[in-house]
Image (tube, rainbow, N blue to C red):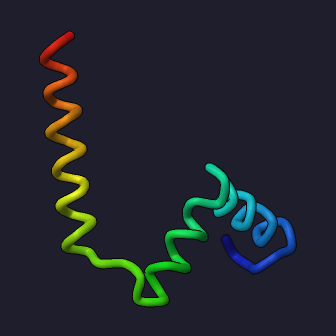
Amino acid sequence: MRSLTKEYIRQALEACLEDDGYALKFYFIAQHGCFDIQKMNIILDEIKKEQAEWDRSE
């Protein structure tokens, strides 16, 4: 990108709004102290374990 144009801004906003605006929602809660990285890491580890168990059972 060489300059900030309306097209680049539109593309960036559209990218942020994908998946029901998940990226913007995540950014918002992270900026307002509602996000605890340690808790999120624990949750992600649990999800990975469950997914691995699911994969083994197939």
Residue at figure coordinates x 65%, y 60% from the top left: 21
Residue 30 shown left or right of residue 15 in the figure: left
Q: Looking at the picture, does residue 27 appear above or below residue 46?
A: below
Q: Looking at the picture, does residue 56 appear above or below residue 42?
A: above
Number of numbered labels in the structure image? 0
Q: Position of residue 35 (x, y in %)?
A: 37, 78
Residue 58 shown left or right of residue 21 in the figure: left
Q: Looking at the picture, does residue 29 appear above or below residue 26?
A: below
Residue at figure coordinates x 26%, y 74% from the top left: 37
Q: Of all residues shown, which one is farthest toward the bottom? A: 32
Residue at figure coordinates x 55%, y 64% from the top left: 23
Q: Looking at the picture, does residue 29 appear above or below residue 48?
A: below
Residue at figure coordinates x 86%, y 73% from the top left: 6
Q: Position of residue 27 (x, y in %)?
A: 52, 76
The residue closer to the viewer here, 11 or 28, is: 28
**Location of the C terminus (image quadrant):** top left
The residue closer to the viewer here, 23 or 43, is: 43
Image-quadrant location for residue 56: top left
Q: Position of residue 31 (x, y in %)?
A: 48, 87
The residue closer to the viewer here, 8 or 45, is: 45
**Location of the N terminus (image quadrant):** bottom right
Q: Of all residues shown, which one is farthest toward the top? A: 58
Q: Position of residue 18 (x, y in %)?
A: 66, 52
The residue closer to the viewer here, 2 or 17, is: 17
